[in-house]
Image: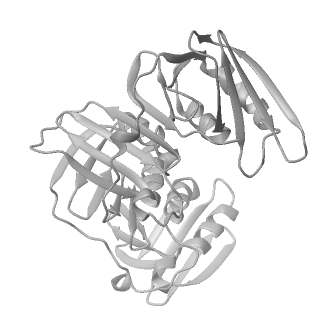
């Protein structure tokens, strides 16, 4: 195997594939990237047995072959070279040589046949959609996923499909994010699949350079997202997602309408003096006014008054300010609508005239 390639072309691929490679591996082969060369096409694969990322590079002047090379060391070498550098990678058996200008490197390599692969799977549902649509779906919900929760099915994102509707739902038990997208899809029943956390984060990265459209293929235990020159395959979580519909609050007459950016800035300032561990903040609502108050164990206090449209009853409710800021950060509308039933109930946040994205945040006792 022999590859002649520019640093500019190789470095982004190494950076993307190294995200999949785990630092601590039980199998030495998993700390490697698989290079497969066929004519002008170079195929680079990374896997941790749960997620598999494949990048294809069109680059003439290669010699066919396949070899597994150390992922982290190859990335570090490529990063350290000058921006306009050209690399020659040549190897077979247990050694690979890398040359660039006056630099020479000899790396330990492994046989391509030893490299594990998720491989093909029986596709049950397949559809194509704009990459931008899937990007919006993922980015507007994935922040609410749990992290290392014992309820393993929360450590991921639910992808729910119905006729002409694709829905993403994420929750960590304290907040919930839900987004709907309309796509051309014909199904005889509702399908639900849980994508693991790492798979969701890698899909979000892949979509940045996926091109105009992506193809989504789903089997019983796997999901694949494929763009023009890259594809990601992830195992699905074997579990049942909770009934999220019942935690979405009913509509309430206690409705706050606020400028999203002004509210976000005000809460950010108040959060500076909130408890660093619990991040609690009190929202005091009166006609036309929202007051955000934060305290911390050092007896320090912050208070922000924000003009809002509010005609409901006066109330005081506590929230984790980080959860509110996360929602305001992913929303793209100029205004935000916040619906509150009472001081002990969750709040519902969404755009004023669009319910395709909805966010639920549970209250805190302060």
Question: Which of the 4 image quarters holds residue 128?
Answer: top left
Instruction: Residue 49 in the image: state x and y as whole percent.
Output: 39, 74
Compared across the picture, whether 328 is left or right of 116 comes to: right
- The answer to whether 88 is drawn above or below residue 253 in the figure is below
Residue furthest to the left in view is 188
- The answer to whether 265 is drawn above or below residue 92 in the figure is above
Q: Which residue is found at the position 86% from the left and 48% from the top?
A: 297
Relative depth, front residue between 81 and 356: 356
Q: Which residue is found at the position 65% from the left and 68% from the top?
A: 76
Q: Answer whether residue 228 is visible to the viewer in this image.
A: no
Q: How many marks?
A: 0
Question: Which of the 4 image quarters holds residue 263?
Answer: top right
- The answer to whether 243 is drawn above or below residue 152 in the figure is above
Image quadrant containing the N terminus? bottom left
Q: Which residue is found at the position 76% from the left and 36% from the top?
A: 271
Compared across the picture, whether 200 is left or right of 228 comes to: right
Compared across the picture, whether 264 is left or right of 348 comes to: right
Relative depth, front residue between 170 and 38: 170
Instruction: Residue 356 in the image: state x and y as whole percent.
Output: 37, 27
Instruction: Residue 5 in the image: state x and y as whole percent.
Output: 50, 61
């Amino acid at each position: 195997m022999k590859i002649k390639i520019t640093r500019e072309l190789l470095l982004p691929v190494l950076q993307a594939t190294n995200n999949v490679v785990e630092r601590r591996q039980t199998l030495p082969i998993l700390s490697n990237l698989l290079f497969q060369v066929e004519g002008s096409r170079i195929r680079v694969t990374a896997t941790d047995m749960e997620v598999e990322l494949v990048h294809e590079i069109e680059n003439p002047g290669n010699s066919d072959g396949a070899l597994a090379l150390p992922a982290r060391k190859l990335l570090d070498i490529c990063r350290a070279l000058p921006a306009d550098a050209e690399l020659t990678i040549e190897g077979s058996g247990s050694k690979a040589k890398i040359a660039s200008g006056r630099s020479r490197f000899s790396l330990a390599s492994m046989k391509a046949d030893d490299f594990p692969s998720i491989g093909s799977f029986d596709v049950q549902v397949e559809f194509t959609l704009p990459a931008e649509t899937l990007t919006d779906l993922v980015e507007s919900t994935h922040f609410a996923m749990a992290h290392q929760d014992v309820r393993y099915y929360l450590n991921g994102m639910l992808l729910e499909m119905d006729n002409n509707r694709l829905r993403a739902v994420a929750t960590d038990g304290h907040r919930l994010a839900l987004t709907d997208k309309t796509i051309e899809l014909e199904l005889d029943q509702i399908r639900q699949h849980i994508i693991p956390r790492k798979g969701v984060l890698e899909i979000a990265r892949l979509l940045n350079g996926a091109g105009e459209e992506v193809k989504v293929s789903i089997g019983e235990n796997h999901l694949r997202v494929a763009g023009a020159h890259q594809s990601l395959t992830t195992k699905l979580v074997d579990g049942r997602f909770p009934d999220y519909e019942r935690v979405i609050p009913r509509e309430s007459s206690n409705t706050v309408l606020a400028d999203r950016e002004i509210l976000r800035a005000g809460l950010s300032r108040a959060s500076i003096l909130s408890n660093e561990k619990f991040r609690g903040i009190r929202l005091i609502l009166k006609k036309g006014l929202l007051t955000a108050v934060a305290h911390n164990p050092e007896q320090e206090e912050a208070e922000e008054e924000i003009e809002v449209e509010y005609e409901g009853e006066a109330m005081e409710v506590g929230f984790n300010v980080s959860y509110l800021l996360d929602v305001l950060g992913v929303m793209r509308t100029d205004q935000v609508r916040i619906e509150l039933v009472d001081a002990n109930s969750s709040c519902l946040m969404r755009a004023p005239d669009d319910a395709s994205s909805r966010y639920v945040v549970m209250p805190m006792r302060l």
